Amino acid sequence: MYRTHTCGELSMKNTEQDVVLCGWVQKSRDLGGMTFVDLRDRYGLTQLVFNMDTNIGLCEKARKLGREFVIQVKGKVRERSNKNLKMPTGEIEIDVCELNILNRSEIPPFTIEEDTDGGEELRMKYRYLDLRRNSVKKAIILRHQVAQEVRKYMDSIGFIEVETPVLVNSTPEGARDFVVPSRMQPGTFYALPQSPQTLKQLLMVAGFDKYFQIVKCFRDEDLRADRQPEFSQIDCEMSFVERNDILETFEGLTKCLFKQVRGIEFSEPFIKMPYHEAMEFYGSDKPDLRFGMKFNDLTELVKGHSFAVFDSSEYVCGICAEGCSEYTRKQLDDLTEFVRRPQIGAKGMVYLRYNTDGSLKSSVDKFYTPEELKKWAESANARPGDLILILSGDKKKTLSALSELRLEMGNRLGLRKKDTFVPLWVVDFPLLEWDEEAKRFFAMHHPFTSPNPEDMQLMQTDPGKVRANAYDLVINGVEIGGGSIRIHDAEVQQLMFKVLGFTEEEAVKQFGFLMNAFKFGAPPHGGIAFGFDRLVAMFGGQDSIRDFIAFPKNNSGRDVMLDTPSQISQKQLDELHIKVESKK
Amino acid sequence: MYRTHTCGELSMKNTEQDVVLCGWVQKSRDLGGMTFVDLRDRYGLTQLVFNMDTNIGLCEKARKLGREFVIQVKGKVRERSNKNLKMPTGEIEIDVCELNILNRSEIPPFTIEEDTDGGEELRMKYRYLDLRRNSVKKAIILRHQVAQEVRKYMDSIGFIEVETPVLVNSTPEGARDFVVPSRMQPGTFYALPQSPQTLKQLLMVAGFDKYFQIVKCFRDEDLRADRQPEFSQIDCEMSFVERNDILETFEGLTKCLFKQVRGIEFSEPFIKMPYHEAMEFYGSDKPDLRFGMKFNDLTELVKGHSFAVFDSSEYVCGICAEGCSEYTRKQLDDLTEFVRRPQIGAKGMVYLRYNTDGSLKSSVDKFYTPEELKKWAESANARPGDLILILSGDKKKTLSALSELRLEMGNRLGLRKKDTFVPLWVVDFPLLEWDEEAKRFFAMHHPFTSPNPEDMQLMQTDPGKVRANAYDLVINGVEIGGGSIRIHDAEVQQLMFKVLGFTEEEAVKQFGFLMNAFKFGAPPHGGIAFGFDRLVAMFGGQDSIRDFIAFPKNNSGRDVMLDTPSQISQKQLDELHIKVESKK
C-alpha cells in the first residue's frame, strides 16, 4: 500500500502522527519561506507544508510540482495556525519530510475545479479529467449509492435481481433497435433490448413472483437533448398483484430512497391523480405539483360577448398568479412573447388584473363589464392582488401552451423549489390512441397492457374510452417511471389485438413466443420501470442526466473520448458477411 | 393482492387461520372421498384438500384441474393427519372452501420436476417452464444472493460501482468483437466490450480509487462447451496499491462470500504459489489442491539403464497414489488407456507397485534393480501400499498429461470432494509468451500488465524470463479470476511495446486514447476480474454455468426460446446502410 491514510480523513485527532498520503496536486502556493500544496484524492483535500528553513532541497522539489502531478508524501500531522473550518481536514496540515513523484502530468486542457474553464465538448473528450471535478465525481458516487439502496430495498422485500440477456431478438414495434450481426449464422442479427419487457413477463410465467433488475436498455433514436442511446432503468415485475399493490411497493421504494439518499421523509401517501384530471387542471400528464396554479376553464363565461378570439375558440382557460396584479406592461409583454414562441404555439395572451383595491383591469376590457370580469376572477379563485393569465384556441394546444405558461410562472415566482419534492401517481391513462393517419388505434403503452377492469365492457362498444390499468410516477413535473398491469387472459389479449387491427397471423408473427408462453399458466402480473439516470439526476438536483453517467455519448450518439463509433477492418466485415453501402 | 400468504410459509402456528393462496398445480391425487392438490409457487408447496363429503361441486372442480393450472384458493389452515416433516409446510394443509381458476395451462412439454423427462434442447426452448423446476429456480436465486453479497461487501470497503458503457470501440487485439452498426454515422460501428479493461483504467486516472462493477462482457468466439457469448464478471480496479493489497482485498471478498453463501469459514490465508511451482508440481496453472499427489521428477534417477523410452525422454515424472498398490491389471490398463486418449496424448504409462510387504513391482522390472526402484519410491515419498504412476516424454506435454492423470486419480479415489474448497493464489506468471510462428513475444495477459519490479532489469536483457505482476485465483482447479498490477509509468510502457515489437505508431494507433490519458497523472493501479457465472456455479456445486444464467444461449450462440439471431427487415438494413453478402 502506498499510503496510510486518504486525503479526506485526517483531523485534530491525528496530530503528531506520522502519515503517508498519495494524490494529485490540486494547487500550490509559494509564500517565500513556505510552500503549500493542496493534495487531492477521491476522499478530499489535505494541505501539505514544505518549509525552506528546515529542508531547502525538499521545498525546492515541491516548488517544481505541476498541477495534477501524482505524488506520495510522508510527514507529520500538525495543527494549522490558519484553520479552514469549511474543510473536513481544515484544522490540520502535513509537515512533509519526504516527497516522491509517482507520475508527472502535462498541463490539463481545462482546470480541474468546480467552475472549470472547459466547455462541454472538451470536457467530454477528456472525460477522465472531467471526472476528477468534485461535482461530477459526486454525481457518479451518488449513482452508486442510489443503486445500492435500490438493491438493498428490493432484496429486503423479496425481489430477485435476474440478469436478462443483452443479445436478444429484434421487435418490430416500438422504437428502432440497435442490431448485432451474427458471425456464426451469417445474414442474421441479434438486437439489443429496448427494455426487458417480454423477458420479465416470461419470468412471471416462470413463477419468479417478484423480479427486478437495474439494467441497460438501448434505443437507436435520433437523439434529443439529454437522451442517451444506452440508458439504465430499474425494471420490475410482480405476480398475483393488482394495481395498488404495485403502487404501494414502489411508493415504498421511492420513500426509502428519499430517506436514505436525501434525508427526506414522506409521511403521507403519494397523491393519485387520474390522467384526465392532470390534463384538465394542469394541461400535462406529468404536472409539477410543487405549486398550485390550477387551470380554470372559462370557456362558458367568456363566450357571446363579441370578442371574436374567444367566441371562435374551442377552449378558453386561465391560471391565477397570486400577488402579481402589479406586473408591469413589460412583464406582461414578456409573457405574451413567451407563449407565442413556436415551441409553445399560442397566438396571444389575455390578462386580468385583480387590483388590490378590488378593481379589475383586463386587456379585453371593452368587451366585458366589470361584473363579468369579476365572475372570471371568482371562477379562478383569485383575490385582490392576483393576476389571471388566459389562453384560448383549440383545446389540446391550449392545454399544452397553458401548461408551459404555468411552469414559466412557477419559475418566475420561485415556486419550483429545488429542495421540495412532490411525488404523484398519474393513473387511468387511456388504453388506446387513435391515429388519424393510419385510421386505427394504437396501444398507448404496449399491446399487453390490461384495460381497467371497470371498463372491460367498453372494449367492444367504445374502445377509445377504455382506461388502461397503467400508471406513471411523476415527481416535480418529471416522469420518473411508469408501468401497467398486463393482460394474462388469452381472450382479453385476442380482443386487444382485434381492437388494434391485428390479424391473428400478424399477432403470432410479432408476439408468438410470448403468446406461446402464456398458454402454459401465466399468472396475473404487472410491473413498472423507473428511469435510473433520471432518478439519480433528480436526487442530485440536476436537470441534465449527463453528469450522472460516467462515460456518456453526445447528441450524435458519439463517445468522443473513445472516438466511437468508428470504422472496423475489412476482415471483420468479411467474417460477418456484411458490406457497407455508400449513402445514397 | 390476490393472496394473503405464499405457498412456503404456513405452519402449525397458522392452524385455523383463513388464508388465500395462489400458485400452480404441481400435482393432484384423487383418493375417492378426498382430492389432494399440491400448490406450488416460488416459495414452496402447500397441500390443498377438497372433500367430496362437504362440498361435492368444489371437489369436482378440483378434480378437473390440470397440471400447471394457475389457481387461487381460499380456505382454512388445518393440521395434517399424515405429516411430512421433510417439507417446511408439511405439518399443515388447506381445507379449501373456494377455488378460482386464474389461468389454464396446456400440458407442458416436459414434467416440472427435479428429474424431468425433458432433454436439454426442449428445456431451453421452453426455458420459462424449465425455470419453474426447483433446482434451476434455486440456481437463479443463488446468483441473486451472491450478487447482493458482492455489492454489499465491496460497498462496505469503499468501492464504487460505476456502470461503463456497452457501446464502445472495437479493439484489434484480444478476442473477436461483436459490433453494432451506427445508423447515424453510416459505415461506422460500435463494439460490445470484451471487458471494461481500458475504461476501468481510465476511472483510476480519473481518481475513482476503488472501482467495481458486476458487468456483462461479450466475446464473439466459436463456443466451446460451457462458454457463453455474453457473460458476467465482477470487475475491479484499485489505485495506490501493490500486489498484496489486491490479493488481500479479494481474498476478503472471497472469504466473505464463502461465509455468507455457503457458511464456510477460512481462518488461514489462502495459499500463494508461484506459477513455475504450480507447473512443476501439478503440471497446471490451476491446480486442484483438494488433494496432494504432487509430481516427483524422476528424470535423473531413471536414465542410463537401457530403457530406451526413458533414456530418450526429456522428462520422466511420477505421482504416488496412496494405498493403490493392489490395483488390478484391469485398473492399470484402464489408466493406460486414459492417458493414451488423444486429448491427453501420452504414449504409455509405467507403474511401480510398492507392495505392503515392502517388495516392489514395476512394468519395467527388467531394466532396474529392486534397489533402484526403491530409490524411485523414496523420491516419490511412497510408502508400502502405494502405487506410483509414471509418464515420460517431452516436458511440456508430460506435465500436462500427468496433470490429467492426477485429476483422474483424484476422482477415482474420491479426493475431489464437492463440499471441500481449497482456494489458491497462483502468482508470478510469465510476462511474455514467445510465439514460434510470429517470431515475437506476446503479452500473456495484456500489454498494460506490469513486470514484477524485481525483474525490471531483465526486460532489456532476457525478457522471456521476466515475471509479470499478475495473479489468478484458483479454487478446486477452476480459475475463478485473475488480474495484474498495471504499468503506470510511460517509460516502462514504451519498453513493453518495444519488447512486443510494436512501432510507436502502431502503439498509438491501437492504444492511443489510453496512452493519452496516462499523460495527465496516472496513479499506480491494478485490478482483478472474477468470472461471475463460474463463481456462482461453484457455490452452487455445479460444473456447468448454464443453469445459473436465466436465459442462456446454446453452443451455436442461439437463444432457441427467443429464436435469435434472426433475419431483420430490409428497411432496417437500408437504414443502417449495410448489406448482407451471401456466404462464399
Image (spheres, coloured by chain):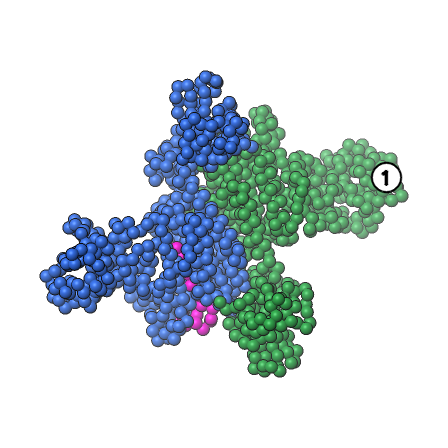
Chain colours: A green, B blue
Vertical order, B131 against B288 (above or below): above
- The x, y position of residue B283, in whole percent, is 28, 60
Magenta stretch: residue B490 in it?
Answer: yes
Q: Nearest the camera: B335 or A194?
A: B335
Residue at x 57% of width, y 56% of height: A140
Q: Residue at x 58, y 73 (%)?
A: A76
Secondary element type, mark 1: helix
- Residue B170, horizontal then vertical, whole percent: 44, 57
Can residue A42 be seen from the camera position used here?
yes
Q: Which residues are magenta?
A: B479-498
Residue A515 in view in this figure: no
When asked about the image quadrant of residue B91, the answer is: top left
Q: Chain of mark 1?
A: A
- Quadrant (top left/top right/bottom left/bottom right) for the N terminus of chain B: top right
Q: Is residue B34 magenta?
A: no
Crowding near pointer 1: few (<14 within 10 Å), some, many (20+)? Answer: few
Task: Decide if residue A530 is on the left or right side of residue B386.
Answer: right
- Residue B73 at x, y percent in the picture: 50, 27
Q: Quadrant of residue A400?
A: top right
Q: Amino acid at mark 1?
A: Lys
Q: Horizontal and vertical percent for residue B381?
A: 24, 62
Q: Nearer the viewer, residue B549 or B338?
A: B338
Side (left or right) of A188 relative to A22: left
Q: Which residue in the protein does label 1 denote?
A: A366
Q: Is residue B29 above or below residue B485?
A: above
Q: Residue at x 89, y 43 (%)?
A: A357
Tell me which residue sits at (37%, 47%) in the image: B541
